[in-house]
């Protein structure tokens, strides 16, 4: 049969696709000819889901429920785990075949003996090629101004949308716009470590709240609650099955509410009616329409719990929120999703108690349960209050607990880990925080082999919430580290085994085409960095990013000269002062001022008359004379051209000999 299948062309019920290195790296199966095998109802237009999803069975027997993304010409699900297990390489083939309507299968053929290099035409100029899978944890390190934070945008897009990144037609502005779209969707989040950043900020901590938030354990005065930090929240979001949530209508940030439909001692007829007809109901027919009722009116004689329940039911529960129906103090009997707005129905249908006139439309996902909810409610039982929010429970945690308890929710299909959307947490200045204090016991869990789903997966019990916690496989960590701020060696023990380190050195070559009044900016940066490396170390070199504003085509030579002056005056010189701790002699050498004409020197020693200051009896050494900055030099071309007036080799030797003799 395969002899009758051409590459990328479907004949009958088959489609043969050659996998590229980019597809292998990102876990994609892509082809412009997918529409020849998959009908339009499985193909998404824009960012919306299509009308229907199809099933795709892999050789191992696991099945994805997925669809085609038309604008990228690829299957939505990712197959990184399958590619890795089969050790596929660029040039190997994926063969898609139709089993029945809405059901397809895929097989693979390994045709390439070696993995070819990624064609340069597949990359935008300046982008690195990586022939290995994208690491889950990586750190970009280098001196200041080398584009580490700038690089995180490309690195995040490589994870989230490799097709868009490697499309040579997309400008930097387009890449940033695409990145911002992922930020809006909360698939990318950004945090900066600093000396005061803590475990409580990153993972979870206790926060004070003056609102009466704890219905199960009411107390007066200040209430304390456990709140998730950015890392724990992202782990929870990454575990979410968004495909299922969209299918059943769970909203972003859905709240979980407890509801009692009839008393436990009742016949249960109204509860059964609600489950069968997609409703949730409560009583208080005397109140009328909650939206227009004055619940505090003495005529209604409502207690605070009753007022709160009615307010929540009629005004605060939103479409997309989750309801759990009380079974006992520790168990729930049903779970569902609110699908519409509150309704007042004075004439109830047959089979419903006459006073149950308050109604919410609900899609019940599971009924007839005896599921103990105490564990995920942090050991706290449920109360008889009719309606209140379960603030300790989130929908992802509830769904995961139901799965572990063997509960299969309505319309739920098993979602493979690779089908979950990737998430990216960018940690800027990761070395400025106390990593051991911030990550705590979770430093082990971020290792790829310890992630949830891995063979050596681990989980811990969080100290405040007492929840079981693990790190999902689809959460990527990208850090940046300024090597001039702290030595890389100081972080080896904590981070080296957990992160892939990628150096971001200065790139003077990016400045070689920039000339300001005859001064080659690339050579200017090389000269200073060569001297800094000899006098200090390579971690304190100057980055090319400081000079990149000079590359704008619309600038005139006068404007470039003025901008160069501002860069040296406001950025370069203050940074050198910090690097050398106000040791002006070394700054003087870095700028090559000791071999310039006096008028072109940025720095110099005062020419004060020491004899007049101290008299003949005091012999003041010349090197103790105060240093000063020559402001006029910043406007002179010779001051900059003098930095690169001799060969780098000779200059290093001269500087080093002066440094040693001093």
Image (cartoon, rainbow, N blue to C red):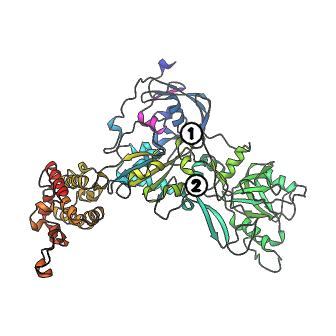
Residue at 13%, 62% (x, y): give it.
Answer: 594
Residue at 72%, 71% (x, y): give it.
Answer: 291
Q: What x and y, as percent, mark residue 468?
A: 66, 50
Count of all numbered marks drawn on residues in the image: 2
Is residue 515 visible to the viewer in this orientation of the structure?
Answer: no
Residue 375 is covered by the magenta coloring: no
Q: Residue lying farthest front? A: 617
Q: Secondary structure at mark 1?
A: helix
Q: Residues within 10 Å of mark 2 (few under 14, many from 20)?
A: some
What segment carries the magenta color?
A: 14-28
Mark 2, mark 1: which one is toward the viewer?
A: 2
Is residue 493 visible to the viewer in this orientation of the structure?
Answer: yes
Compared to 64, does 346 lie above or below? below
**Mark carried by residue 541:** none
Q: In terms of sequence position, does the residue under pointer 2 or pointer 1 come before the other?
A: 1
Residue 99: which quarter of the image? top right
**Mark carried by residue 232:** 2
Q: Secondary structure at mark 2?
A: helix
Residue 586 or 621: which is nearer the viewer? 621
Residue that badge 1 annotates: 42
Tell whether 616 sits left or right of 538: left
């Amino acid at each position: 049969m395969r002899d009758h299948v051409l590459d990328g062309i479907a004949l009958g019920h088959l489609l043969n696709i050659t996998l590229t290195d980019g597809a292998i790296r990102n876990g994609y199966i892509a082809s412009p000819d997918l529409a020849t095998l998959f009908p339009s109802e499985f193909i998404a237009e824009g960012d919306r889901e299509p009308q229907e999803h199809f099933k795709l069975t892999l050789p191992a027997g696991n099945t994805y429920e997925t669809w085609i993304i038309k604008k990228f010409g690829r299957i939505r699900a990712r197959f990184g785990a399958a590619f890795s297990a089969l050790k596929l390489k660029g040039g190997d083939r994926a063969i898609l075949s139709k089993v029945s309507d809405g059901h397809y299968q895929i097989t693979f053929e390994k045709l390439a003996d070696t993995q070819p290099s990624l064609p340069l035409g597949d990359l935008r100029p300046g982008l690195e090629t990586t022939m290995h899978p994208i690491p889950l944890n990586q750190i970009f390190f280098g001196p200041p101004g080398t584009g580490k934070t700038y690089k995180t945008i490309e690195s995040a897009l490589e994870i989230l949308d490799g097709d868009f990144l490697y499309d040579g037609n997309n400008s930097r502005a387009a890449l940033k716009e695409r990145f911002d779209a992922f930020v809006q969707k909360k698939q990318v989040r950004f945090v900066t470590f600093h000396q005061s950043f803590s475990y409580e900020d990153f993972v979870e901590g206790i926060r004070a709240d003056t609102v009466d938030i704890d219905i199960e354990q009411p107390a007066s005065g200040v209430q304390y609650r456990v709140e998730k930090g950015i890392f724990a929240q992202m782990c929870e979001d990454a575990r979410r099955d968004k495909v299922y949530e969209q299918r059943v209508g769970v909203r972003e940030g859905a709240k979980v509410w407890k509801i009692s439909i009839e008393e436990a001692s009742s016949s249960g007829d109204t509860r059964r009616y609600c489950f069968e007809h997609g409703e949730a109901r409560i009583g208080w027919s005397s109140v009328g329409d909650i939206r227009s009722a004055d619940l505090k009116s003495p005529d209604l004689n409502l207690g605070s719990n009753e007022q709160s329940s009615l307010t929540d039911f009629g005004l605060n529960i939103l479409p997309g929120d989750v309801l759990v129906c009380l079974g006992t103090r520790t168990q729930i009997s049903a779970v569902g999703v609110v699908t519409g707005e509150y309704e007042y129905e004075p004439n109830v249908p047959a089979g419903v108690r006459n006073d149950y006139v308050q109604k919410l439309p609900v899609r019940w996902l599971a009924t007839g349960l005896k599921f103990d909810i105490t564990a995920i409610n942090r050991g706290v039982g449920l109360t008889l209050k009719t309606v209140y929010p379960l603030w300790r429970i989130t929908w992802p945690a509830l769904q995961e607990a139901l799965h572990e308890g063997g509960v299969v929710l309505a319309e739920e299909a098993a979602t493979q880990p690779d089908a979950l959307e990737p998430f990216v947490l960018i940690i800027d200045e990761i070395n400025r925080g106390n990593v051991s204090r911030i990550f705590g016991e979770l430093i082990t869990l971020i290792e790829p082999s310890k992630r949830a789903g891995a063979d050596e997966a681990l989980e811990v019990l969080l100290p405040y919430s007492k929840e079981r916690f693990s790190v999902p496989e689809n959460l990527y960590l990208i850090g940046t580290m300024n090597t001039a701020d702290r030595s890389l060696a100081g972080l080896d023990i904590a981070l080296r085994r957990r992160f892939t380190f990628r150096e971001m050195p200065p790139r003077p070559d990016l400045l070689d085409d920039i000339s300001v009044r005859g001064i080659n900016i690339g050579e200017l940066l090389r000269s200073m960095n060569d001297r800094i490396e000899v006098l200090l170390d390579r971690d304190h070199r100057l980055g090319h990013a400081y000079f990149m504003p000079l590359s704008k085509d619309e600038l005139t030579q006068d404007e470039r000269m003025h901008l160069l002056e501002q860069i040296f005056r406001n950025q370069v010189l203050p940074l050198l002062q910090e690097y050398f701790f106000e040791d002006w002699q070394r700054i003087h050498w870095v700028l090559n001022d000791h071999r310039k004409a006096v008028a072109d020197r940025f720095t110099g020693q005062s020419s004060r008359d020491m004899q007049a200051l101290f008299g003949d009896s005091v012999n003041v050494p010349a090197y103790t004379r105060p240093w000063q900055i020559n402001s006029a030099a910043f406007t002179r071309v010779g001051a900059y051209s003098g930095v690169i007036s001799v060969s780098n080799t000779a200059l290093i030797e001269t500087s080093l000999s002066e440094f040693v003799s001093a």
